[in-house]
Amino acid sequence: MNFLEFIRTRIFVRNFLISVALTIVVISLILWALKWYTHHGESMIVPSLIGLTPDQIEQLETISDLEVIIVDSVFDAKMPRGSVLIQDPIPGSKVKRNRKVYLTTVAVMPEKVDMPDLVDLTLRQAAATLETYGLKLGKVTYVPDIAANAVLGQYHKNQAIEPGFEILKNSVIDLRVGQSFGGGRFQLPFLIGKTRQEALDLLNKNLLTVGDETYNDDADPETARVYSQSPSYSPGRLLNAGQPVSLVFKDPSVFDFETHIQQFANDTLNKQIDPENNEF
């Protein structure tokens, strides 16, 4: 019997049909198992967990089909400690059930850094070093010294702080800086509309210091902007090196700084044009 005759026999046809049927059954079972295992076609919306604490997340019914994992923590003074700062996948994403959701929370304890040694650095170098360490430059006080524009002392909350001392990140560091015996006069910068840090940077750049600081209407020091300055600004006005400039702040979310600055500019221009005005 040759091959062509064999494949025409009833035994071959029956076995062939059985093998085809078994193959179809096996493939169907595999596809069904994969669909069941991967939850094919099933999805859910990832809820927003930003701002919630782990205890609050555990009480959410919408999170029961997801696996929540905390992978990191960072310090953020504006968010409640222990609350979620970042989540992955982001809120509103469509995912399959039992998907892992990775969270970054706000550290319960603020991060600390070692206080750098700023003595003998120039003011510009000291400011850059503080920024590198995650610290903020506070008041700069100028004192007569042969080491002009060099840092003579570093202080935190009116207390001298030694290099290497552990300090909370974002702490404010005040500096005492040398001023040449010859003194000098420096131009008063225009500070209206500036943030506190921007105002400090401009004052430091012009070898001036910050005086009294007043925050109207419970303005947040982090977002408040300068409403007025004393001595008041006028083009070309000079102050003695180290002279303090007092600042009044207001909340930009409730006060129209754009109109205020424009009005200030118009008033200044009118005073310059008015020949009878001897104020400037």
Image (cartoon, rainbow, N blue to C red):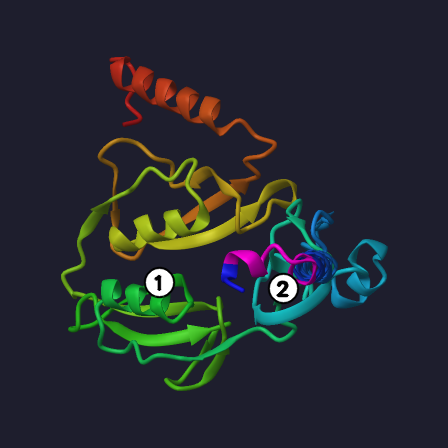
Label 2 belongs to which residue? 103
Q: Residue at x 28, y 13 (%)?
A: 274
Residue occupying image coordinates x 42% and y 74%: 155
Q: Residue 229: which quarter of the image? A: top left
Whether residue 86 is in magenta: the answer is no
- Residue 200 percent location from the top left of the image: 37, 52
Give the magenta range: 4-13
Residue of label 1: 140
Residue 26 vertical position relative to residue 269 in the rendered view, above or below: below
Label 1 environment density (alpha carbons within 10 Å; few <14, some 14–19, many ≥20): many
Q: Quadrant of the N terminus?
A: bottom right
Magenta part mainly helix, strand or loop? helix
How far apart are the alpha carbons under marks 1 and 2? 40 Å
Badge 1 vs badge 2, beta-carbon distance below 8 Å: no
- Residue 210 at x, y percent in the picture: 40, 54
Q: Which residue type carries mark 1?
A: Val
Could you tell me residue 264's position as x and y percent? 40, 24
Q: Nearer the viewer, residue 38 or 22?
A: 22
Indicate which disc, 1 or 2, sits on the residue closer to the N terminus: 2
Element assignment for label 1: strand
**Is residue 257 positioned above or below 56 on the image?**
above
Horizontally, residue 215 falls left or right of residue 277, namely right
Q: Residue furthest front?
A: 1
